[in-house]
């Protein structure tokens, strides 16, 4: 099952076109500059969330959520248009830390776990509201239009093979190709 299988195309476009999402993505561009400060996360929590987002869209054969700068989009979302979800993050991260301590005694943080351990930990939480929200925020920050500052260097688009043609080309068939039309006349 792919990352976008949980959303319809209309839902994805509707989410990406709201002014609030655009503002959060603009914040992401400025937040990724040297010396930028996070709005809602403290540095330790930011490291934990970035590690988790990087397991949802991992780096591997190519860049992932970390390289796309999704942490800054998530931070802005929780500081602005998704402020009501701060409690979900607080409770979810607290539960995740408790599970981490039970599953991996002696570990110091989620970010310090191995990638396999982080994945195992997330799998234990994948049916929670927190995981669903984290996945949603990661996906939006990963695949939004780069002009809104998410999807840094078109990281998300490269991942799915999307090429920005800068113009709309309708999905016409061979019969609409002028070369074919002339042959039949």
Image (cartoon, grey):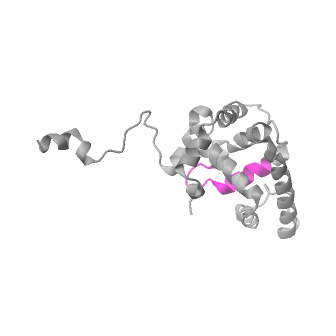
Percent x, y of residue 181: 18, 42
Q: Is residue 34 visible?
A: yes
Asked where in the image residue 74 lies, by quadrant, the reply is: top right
Percent x, y of residue 98: 88, 63
Task: Choose between 153 and 133: the one closer to the eye.
Answer: 133
Image point 13% across, 43% down: which residue?
183
Task: Choose between 11 and 24: the one closer to the eye.
Answer: 11
Residue 53 on the magenta segment? yes
Q: Is residue 151 visible?
A: no
Q: Quadrant of the N terminus?
A: bottom right
Residue 6 on the magenta segment? no
Asked where in the image residue 23 lies, by quadrant, the reply is: top right
> In this view, which residue lies farthest toward the left?
185
Percent x, y of residue 129: 76, 57
Q: Quadrant of the C terminus?
A: top left
Image point 74% across, 38% down: which residue?
81
Please provide the residue range marked out in magenta.
47-64
């Amino acid at each position: 099952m792919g990352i976008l299988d949980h959303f319809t195309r209309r839902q994805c476009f509707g989410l990406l076109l709201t002014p609030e999402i655009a503002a959060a993505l603009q914040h992401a561009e400025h937040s990724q500059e040297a010396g930028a400060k996070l709005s809602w996360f403290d540095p330790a929590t930011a490291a934990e969330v970035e590690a988790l987002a990087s397991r949802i869209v991992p780096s591997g054969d190519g860049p992932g959520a970390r390289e796309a700068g999704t942490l800054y989009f998530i931070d802005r979302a929780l500081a602005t248009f998704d402020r009501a979800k701060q409690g979900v993050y607080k409770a979810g991260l607290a539960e995740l830390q408790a599970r981490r301590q039970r599953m991996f005694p002696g570990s110091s943080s989620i970010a310090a776990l191995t990638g396999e351990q982080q994945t195992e930990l997330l799998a234990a939480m994948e049916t929670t509201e927190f995981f669903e929200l984290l996945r949603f925020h990661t996906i939006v920050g990963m695949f939004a239009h780069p002009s809104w500052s998410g999807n840094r260097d078109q990281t998300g688009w490269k991942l799915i093979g999307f090429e920005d043609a800068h113009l709309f080309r309708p999905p016409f068939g061979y019969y609409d190709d002028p070369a074919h039309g002339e042959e039949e006349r």
